Image (cartoon, coloured by chain):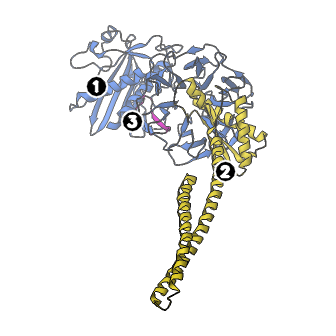
Amino acid sequence: MIAGYQKKIICLTGALILVFFMSGVGRADYTYINISNPFLRKVPLAIPVFKNLSENSIDAQVARQAADMLSDALEFTGYFKMLDRGAFLIKPEGPAIKMPGINFKNWTVIGSELLITGAYSMHDNQLEIELRLFDTFKEQLLVGKRYKGGKSDQRKMIHRFCNEVIFRLTGKRGLFNSQLAFVSTGSGNKEIYFCEFDGYRPEQLTRTKHITLSPAWSSDNKWIAYTSFINGKPDLFIRNLRQKRGSIVDRKGINATPAWVPGQFSLAATLSFSGDQEIYLLTGTGKIIKRLTHSRGIDVSPSFSPDGKQMAFVSQRGGTPQIYIKHLETGRVTRLTFEGRYNTQPSWSPAGDKIAYSAMENGNINIMVINTDGRGLMQLTHDAGNNECPTWSPDAGMIAFSSTREGGVSRIYIMTAYGTDQRRLLSLRGEQSNPQWSSNITNN
Amino acid sequence: MWICLSLLLIVPGLLFFTSCAKKTVQSEPTLTQQAAQVEPDAAQDDAAAKLAAEKALQEELARQKAIEEERLQAEAAEAAEAADAADAAGREAMAARSMFVNEDIYFEFDSYVLTGLAQDILVGKAQWLRINSDSAVAIEGHCDERGTNEYNLALGDKRAEIVKDYLVNVGIDASRLTTISYGEEHPVNSGHDEESWAKNRRAHFVVD
């Protein structure tokens, strides 16, 4: 099995070294997770505590913590059913971590279809982790990786492996390097914050002491655009996250609802300097390239298809706010939503096939998903306060949104793209709203 | 407030000076009597005559002072009366301004159409703007909490713009009017019922 492996060393920032010790499978086979509805049946996965390969004994806490981190991250996706470690049939000296030592029958008998084993060692504060994903029925190694780095790189290493697992099982990159931007009132004003995909390490980005709204990530995650009232009216700020530079669009009226064009340094936004709210295409420095909507009345909230060729937006041209799609090459505009009288906040799935939005019916707002051809309408939230502002994870497997379901206070929640596994993402002071999921951050 | 204060000062002042004036008038005969008494035996007592003359001089000074104060008093009263009138006008202007600022234009849910009542109120606003022709105003557009922030930011913008358009149409110079949308971010009423929502769906005026 290991015979065909090739070694490839990639140097990463933070001295992370990753060794591929198996890439024999040239043709991907995605039978593990059914993409058409992966959440109908969760795949049973066993992750025993990692094995210590160091000569000196490291406290068992580290091994357990690393295994738990891996388990939590994979469980987050909603694809897996994590098996209880108490039911494992493991020898006292710990499980075998690789073939041929592994007795796969011990895993299949407890219902496991997938197994991840881990081993780690510490030498002079250098952490080395090796991780392997097995198909327990086929008795086959699916992914094997070894990571080296500082002790503080542990979380990064684990998430990198999670990305490999998801890629091997679904054919799509995972969400484990992504971040979420959102609005929080924790400081007394609406300010932009961001956190890692799982709500870990929230940080405040803006300190405007005024209303700040609608964060939008560029697809390389280097830029963020948002609307702020810091100069007394709603202006658009385009800001580089690493360097101290950026632009401001502060025309008369509103300068709002930014959305970046995938793969480009340009964005769409709603400007009303003409006296009417229209969507314009802007350069990354805030100069108008062209006007994208041409109808009297409100046009707002653009969201691009992943290829950048189409744009969903909200228009009130039909009398009530509804979602429309503009085909940017032909200029043709089609109406997408016909159910209900108040459909706003479209968010185009990174997989391209669906659009999530929020719909108000009988005074309650819920998250809906519809195919881009107008079919397959699904309501994902039910009877749980107001649910607004859906945003897709970069792998299109999950949706984050804000909800007032607990005590009428708005907080950020997540669910799978099919509406299962709804839970709160993080607990912070104040109210949280307006989540925006980034793409995977590749250069960290 | 000013009027009350000035009245408080003026009324007792007037009373005081009138009584003073009366006293001086009464004292005059006494003076002549004294002079008459002094005259027959003038040589008798020079000192007494001197005293009497001094007293007469002092009384004359007091009399003049009283007259002068009376005049000043009358002047003050006149000024107070004028101030009073000006104040009343000021109060009226103040009331008109506060009505202009505090009377909001209300909208139906998800609408930026001006109702009949809204138009009636705007007629009054236009009148105020004509009288106060050097005032510039900001028109704020607001929404209730229902619906989504982004759409409401646009809707608030529409509401402020429609109000501005109305005022421009009735002859107010557009350069005096600016608009700003706050969407649903600045409710005046924090309740979650129709009564609160109705108060929050508004265009509000701020005088720069």
Q: Amino acid at mark 1?
A: Arg
Q: Is residue B94 above or below residue A429?
A: below
Residue marked by disc 1: A64
> Which chain does tag 1 point to?
A
Q: Amino acid at mark 2?
A: Ala
Q: Main secondary structure of the magenta part?
A: loop
Secondary structure at badge 2 equals helix
Secondary structure at badge 1 equals helix
x then y, percent, for residue B49: 49, 86
Q: Amino acid at mark 3?
A: Ile
Q: CA gap, disc 3 to disc 2?
A: 83 Å
Task: Indicate the quadrant where residue A95 lies.
Answer: top left
Specify start and end residues of the magenta stretch as a single range: A185-201
x then y, percent, for residue B5: 54, 55
Q: Residues within 10 Å of mark 3 (few under 14, many from 20)?
A: some
Foreground pick, A239 / A263? A239
Chain identifier, colour blue: A
Based on the picture, tell me whether residue B152 belongs to the magenta stretch. no
x then y, percent, for residue B192: 52, 25
Residue marked by disc 3: A17
Q: Residue furthest top?
A: A109
